[in-house]
Image (cartoon, rainbow, N blue to C red):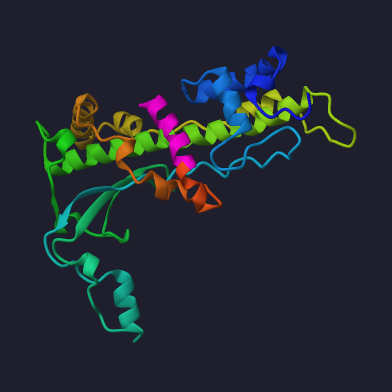
Amino acid sequence: MWPVTATHELTESQRQCCSDILEALFSATPLGISQDRFWDFVFCTPLEDPWNTAKSIPPPPPPCDNTAPRRYIGVFNQDLPPSTNALRHAKKGKHTIRIEQHRRRMMMAYLKVRWTKSGQIEWFWTDFKNKGASPDYVDIYPLDDVREEQASPVIGAKSAVVDDADMWAIWSASVYNLYYAVYLARRRLLRRLDLPPGVQRPLDPSATEIAASFVAPKSFEQYLKNRGTPEDVLILESLARIKDSPKRRGLKGHDLVSQLKRRAVNTSEMTSSLTSETEIILLLS
């Protein structure tokens, strides 16, 4: 049949032609999707128009986004001092020193954990616009998912941020890996079809390419376990309580639409994209 436009049009042999790709995908990311559900993604991913074998194959996805989400953890207990950038501009005479509204007392404060270039981790306290702030100026709210028995508000906040960041890393890697598997599967499928005259066959994905295509999420929790400082131990104990808590927020508490906008060319696609990619979140929850 030409063109092939949907999963039900595949022969049994064609359905099985990507078993090595699926094996590598599930090894990197434990997605609980069936073979047919995977083929449904091949013919219609959320961020593009429906695909069929008469169309060109879109390029592989952009590199996996490892940007960890931040978490709202309290408010500033006083106006923040001028930022380094504000002082630099004032010194050059560009404007007078002033404190912006989002850096004033009782404004929202956030915390995120991130990787440094040397492979270490650092805690980054920020204002609403993601500019740095000192934790000395933050009154941390007790978090619902670690309210009981938390060692301290700071430990509770850090453990919640690690939980968020690791779940985001798993989700981000899972979406990336699924999209890359779709790219490889489309190439493989076109190698298995009788193509009309003038249609060029793509390269068949090799075992080496398949093995190198997928990424594994990098875990902040595992880093803390390996480092094992006294504070790390307290954070891990609090993290364990979060995971057992029925109030655990998880990825559903994040603004996934704004995250997905970085992946979509046309923001009008965001509704369908969010619906479909949320399925991946539910598979990982």
Magenta region includes residue 156: no
Q: Magenta region, mostly helix, strand or loop?
A: helix
Q: Is residue 224 left or right of residue 219?
A: left
Within the image, what quadrant is residue 120 found in? top left
The stretch of residues the image draws in magenta is 272-285
Picture coordinates of residue 45 (x, y %)?
57, 36
Residue 62, percent across and down?
57, 45
Q: Is residue 281 magenta?
A: yes
Please determine whether, in this image, residue 30 is positioned above or below residue 212: above
Indicate the position of residue 262 as horizontal and vertical percent values: 49, 50
In this view, 114 is above or below 188: below
Query: Where the N terminus falls, by quadrant?
Result: top right
Against 155, residue 126 (above or below) is below
* Residue found at x 51% / y 47%: 269
State the image coordinates of residue 85 (x, y, percent, origin top left): 33, 72
- 102 vs 216, nearest the viewer: 102
Residue 56 lies left or right of residue 212; in this view the side is right
